[in-house]
Amino acid sequence: MTTASDPSLDAIMSERRQLINLAYRLLGSLADAEDVVQETYTRWYAMSRRQQEAIESPGAWLTRVAGRVCLDLLGSARARRERYVGEWIPEPLPGRTEWAGDDPADRVTLDESVNMAFLVVLESMTPAERVAFVLHDVFRYPFAEVAEIVGRTPAACRKLASSARHRIDAARTSVTPTARQAGIVREFKQAWEAKDIEALIALLDPDAVGVADGGGVVSAVLRPVEGADRLARFAIEIGVRAPSMTLLERTVNGRPGLVAQRDGVIVMVVAFDVAGDRIKRLWAVRNPDKLHPWTAA
C-alpha cells in the first residue's frame, strides 16, 4: 500500500510546485493552474502501478500532461474571454511574505516571467506560440520535448518560440531598477491619496494606459483609459468615490505595486509597468475571484 512516506510518492508530489509554476505562466490564472495540476495528478493515479513504473521520467511525464491540458484550456479560453465583461487581466500574485495561503507548493516563483507586462504580452499569442515559448525560453525544455507537447515538429516549435520572442522584445520597455520603481509607485500612491492631479500627470507617461478588470462582478471601467491626463483624472475620481479606501505598497507579480483596502479587506490590486521615470501602464484588478491569493484565510 502506498503511504505518504513512499519515496515514489514523494518524488511525484515534489513536482507539484514546478507544475503550478508552468501552468500559471501558460494560463495567467492561479485557479486554473491548480485545476490543471489536479487533473495531471488524476491522470497519473488513474494508471496502474505497473504503468507508472514503466515511465522512465515521471517528472517529464507530468510536465507533458500538464502542458497538453494547458494547451487545450488556452484554446477554449479565447472563447471564454470574448464573453468576459470588460478587460481580462491575468491574476495578480502577492510577494512571498504576503501570500494568504499556507501551502508553499502553491506559490509561484516570482521572476521576470511573471511580471504583469510579460503575462499581458503572452495573452496576445496563439496557444501554440505561448506553450512553445514558455516551455523553451522560460523552463529550458528542448524543442524535441516541446514538440511532443504541442503536437508539431521541433522545427515548427522553434519558429513558434521565435515569433513569440519577437512579440516580447517589441513590447519590452527599458529596465528601471527595482528601488527606483518602488520610489515611483510610492510617489504615485502619495499623489493619489493627496488627489494631486498635477503630480499624478507628472508621474505618468504622456501615452500611459490604465486597464481595469472587474469581470462583471464589481464595477470597473470596461475599456482602457488612455493618456496621462485622463488616467490621472480617473484615479482622482476613484479616490472621491471611495474616501475610505486605504492604499498600501506591496509586491505584485514580483514588482512594486499597490493594493487598496476597504474595512481591512483587499478590494483591488494594482500592477505597474515603469519605464525610466514614468509609469507607462497600470493594471487594476478588482474581480474578487482573482484576489484569493491575497484574501484567502
Image (cartoon, grey):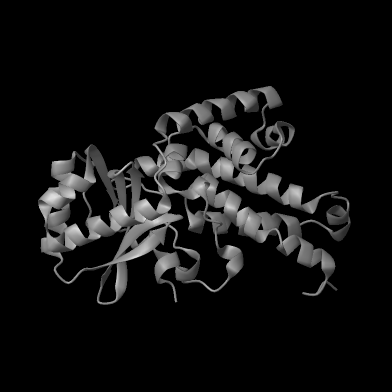
In the picture, which quadrant includes the C terminus? bottom left
Q: Report the front residue among 80 and 272.
A: 272
Q: Is residue 75 visible?
A: yes
What residue appears at the point 29 percent right and 53 percent down from the top-left corner? 184
Q: Quadrant of residue 256?
A: bottom left
Q: Position of residue 260 (x, y in %)?
A: 28, 65
Going by the image, does 197 lie left or right of 180?
left
Going by the image, does 237 lie left or right of 36?
left
Q: Quadrant of residue 216?
A: bottom left
Going by the image, does 286 lie left or right of 48?
left
Q: Position of residue 221 (x, y in %)?
A: 21, 49
Q: Position of residue 275 (x, y in %)?
A: 34, 41
Q: Is residue 285 visible?
A: no
Going by the image, does 278 lie left or right of 28?
left
- Indicate whether 88 appears above or below 33: above
- Indicate whether 146 appears above or below 242: above
What residue appears at the point 43 percent right and 72 percent down from the top-left corner? 296
- Indicate whether 114 appears above or below 99: above
Q: Position of residue 212 (x, y in %)?
A: 27, 50
What residue appears at the point 85 percent right and 73 percent down from the top-left corner? 1
